[in-house]
Amino acid sequence: MARDWSDLFITSEPGSPGGAEAGAESSAAPRRGLLRRLRESMAKTRQALGSEIHSTLFGVLDEHTWERLEEALIMADVGASTTASVVATLEHEASDGTLEGGEQLSERLIELLAETARVGEGHIDLRAKPTVIMAVGVNGTGKTTTIGKLAWHLHNELGFSVLLGAADTFRAAASEQLEGWAERAGAEFVTGPEGSDPGAVAFEAIAAGRSKGTDVVIVDTAGRLHTQDDLMGELGKVRRVIARQLEGAPHETLLTIDATTGQNGLRQAKLFAQTAEVSGVVLTKLDGTARGGIALAIARELSLPVKLIGVGESVEDLRPFDAEDFARALIAES
């Protein structure tokens, strides 16, 4: 999984500069700083888990121990099936002498949680010109803000040209918000009249991107509840329009989920995945919840990789997801 922006994106053949292996020589100090920031942002989840896990794994290991550990992980929205599998493995390895209690069990728990989160393709392939990224999600999840921050990083850290397409034509403020982000990120911007056909705006955005030789086109779609069948059907239509405009597009479909919604976010992901062929998840508002374990439930139950996480308001607080760093920030006390 990705650790920083150069690790997240595939911009050339793997193994070559800018490929999936780029960033391997990044210094340890910045990464320690990122981990510290992540730990600070996930304090609520860790506080909900940390004291219980520490008192459990560093005490007497008996049946009550494993029950308490299960309860703690489920309360953090790690998910019932994920929790059952992880705790069963820990209990087995502890009982057969493979693991001793305390620090070994804690480290093994972090390892198992990280393994759970490593599913699917964790990178975003930007080799198509233009690469089309379709953004979907429920209103209020931070989707439009995430698009703006992603555009900022693509332009300012990788030097890519970016065009934002405002295919959310039902909410006037959405277009204005996205246009503001386009200006801030140094990106081009395409929109249509309020109430116009979202598919037409997506079509025009990709056409403009192709004519300008833009590297990445990001298409915003109307935020909608996963229970709104008509609007979900329209989302499928926008996707088909994009596919007809450019072969292979959309190359990436990112679903933004608000971490504070817990298991409801998992239900959202299931329905969006069916309609929009989601390829990755952006998990936002991790700094405001004790339910950060939902990232693991999404990965295990839907086999959808979490590719980006939002841990605050600033541009720098949108960051690539790293499974080991996430698990350590979730569990480790220091």
Image (spheres, rainbow, N blue to C red):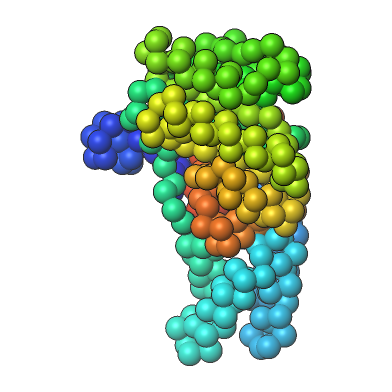
Q: Is residue 149 left or right of residue 131?
A: right
Can residue 107 be seen in this snapshot? no
Q: Is residue 63 left or right of residue 112?
A: right
Where residue 277 appears, x then y in whole percent? 52, 45
Q: Quadrant of residue 238?
A: top right
Query: Residue drawn at (58%, 49%), measured in percent from left and top?
Result: 273
Residue 296 sits above or below residue 199 on the image: below
Q: How many marks?
A: 0
Where residue 276 appears, x then y in whole percent? 57, 42
Q: Which of the two residues, 180 or 94, is positioned nearer the viewer here?
A: 180
Residue 72 sits above or below residue 223 on the image: below
Residue 329 sits above or below residue 317 on the image: below
Can residue 146 be seen in this snapshot? yes
Residue 59 sits above or below residue 110 on the image: below
Q: Which of the two residues, 98 or 132, is positioned nearer the viewer here?
A: 132
Where residue 237 appears, x then y in whole percent? 58, 34
Quarter of the image with the C terminus is: bottom right
Query: Residue drawn at (73%, 15%), measured in percent from left and top?
Result: 194
Query: Residue drawn at (58%, 38%), measured in percent from left and top?
Result: 236
Where residue 120 appears, x then y in whole percent? 44, 53
Q: Quadrant of residue 282?
A: top right
